[in-house]
Image: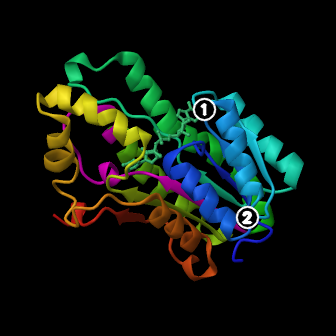
Amino acid sequence: MKLKNKVAIITGSTSGIGLGMAKGLAAEGATIVLNGFGDSQEIENNRKSIEEMGVECIYNGADMTKPDEIRAMVTEAKEKFGHVDIVVNNAGIQTVSPVEDFPEEKWEAIIAINLSSAFYTSRAVVPMMKEQGWGRIINLASAHGLVASPFKSAYVAAKHGMVGFTKSIALELAEENITVNAICPGYVHTPLVDGQIADTAKARGISEDAVVKDVLLKLQATKKFVTVEQLAEMAVFLCSDAAENITGTSLAVDGGWTAQ
Ligand code: NAD
């Protein structure tokens, strides 16, 4: 149990990669703060199934577009558990559209949820991490934090921003025993990807099968979707002592996509 006595907040953990990260960290003994939207019964079932792994798990429904709610989530975790040691900034949304038609409110929401929320969580937890002399901040960027695709202007901008933010605060915190890294996955089959298959088919005028084969997995050299479990293992490793000298980096888990 590498993470016994550690408390981890994972934003956007009611689904997909975030839920997988929560389970992966819980399996190593971490106390978990779940966050995100969704059906309340389903969220409660996920919370209970994490508690059945032998750790404490609470749910906080903070909206990642609202700095006050983000601060309140960190405060709740601190009041309940005494400390926060790990933050996984994972909440994210996507919209696929030509730039001239890109809905303005979607641009604002993507920048807020996929980028600015990481600033607000970090701002809230760093004083605590400095005081305790240990911390791990893991930012879910994307292969789209390293390279671009058309029709994803807001997402690519936010994810490139996440990589830059990661580097900057990693340097600030390097001597505090706090590491900050970005994980850059290729395509993972989650509800977020399911949603964009139809949109991409429309934007490019091709079938949904063609989107999976010729767009999503075209550059993923392994021709396999990355799995949630593989990303959770990466997060556990970044939280381990073996990773204390890994900071400010962007770890591609993308089936060879960005090697090209
Ligand atoms: P998902 O849609 O399955 O999950 C997204 C989570 O974010 C959900 O829990 C949702 O409730 C939450 N969320 C959305 N808006 C929120 C808000 N305003 N406040 C709080 N929570 C909110 O998506 P996913 O595929 O698991 O993606 C997770 C992260 O991984 C995202 O940042 C995404 O950009 C990144 N990513 C995904 C892929 C992929 O192929 N799926 C690839 C690279 C990076």
**Mark 1 residue's CB less than 8 Å from ligand 1:** yes
Q: Is residue 120 left or right of residue 97?
A: right
In the rendered image, residue 37, in percent from the top left (x then y), is placed at: 60, 32
Q: Mark 1 points at which residue?
A: 37
Q: Which amino acid does label 1 sit on?
A: Phe
State which tag comes first along the sequence, 2 or 1.
2
Q: Is residue 81 left or right of residue 209?
A: right
* Viewer-nearest residue: 224 or 238: 224
The local secondary structure at tag 1 comes to loop
The local secondary structure at tag 2 comes to loop
In the image, residue 144 lies in the stretch drawn in magenta: yes
Q: Is residue 168 left or right of residue 209?
A: right
Q: Which amino acid does label 2 sit on?
A: Ala
In the image, residue 196 lies in the stretch drawn in magenta: no
Q: Colour scheme in the image?
A: rainbow
In the depicted structure, whether residue 48 falls above or below residue 153: below
Q: Mark 2 points at which residue?
A: 30
Residue at x 18%, y 27% (from the top left corner): 203
Residue 98, picture quadrant: top left
Classify 10 Å Cα crowding around label 1: few (below 14), some (14-19), many (20 and above): some
Residue at x 67%, y 68% (from the top left corner): 27
Residue at x 63%, y 80% (from the top left corner): 241
The magenta segment is 134-156
Furthest residue toward bottom:
242
| Real-space Cα separation, disc 2 to disc 1, in angstroms | 22 Å
Residue 97, picture quadrant: top left
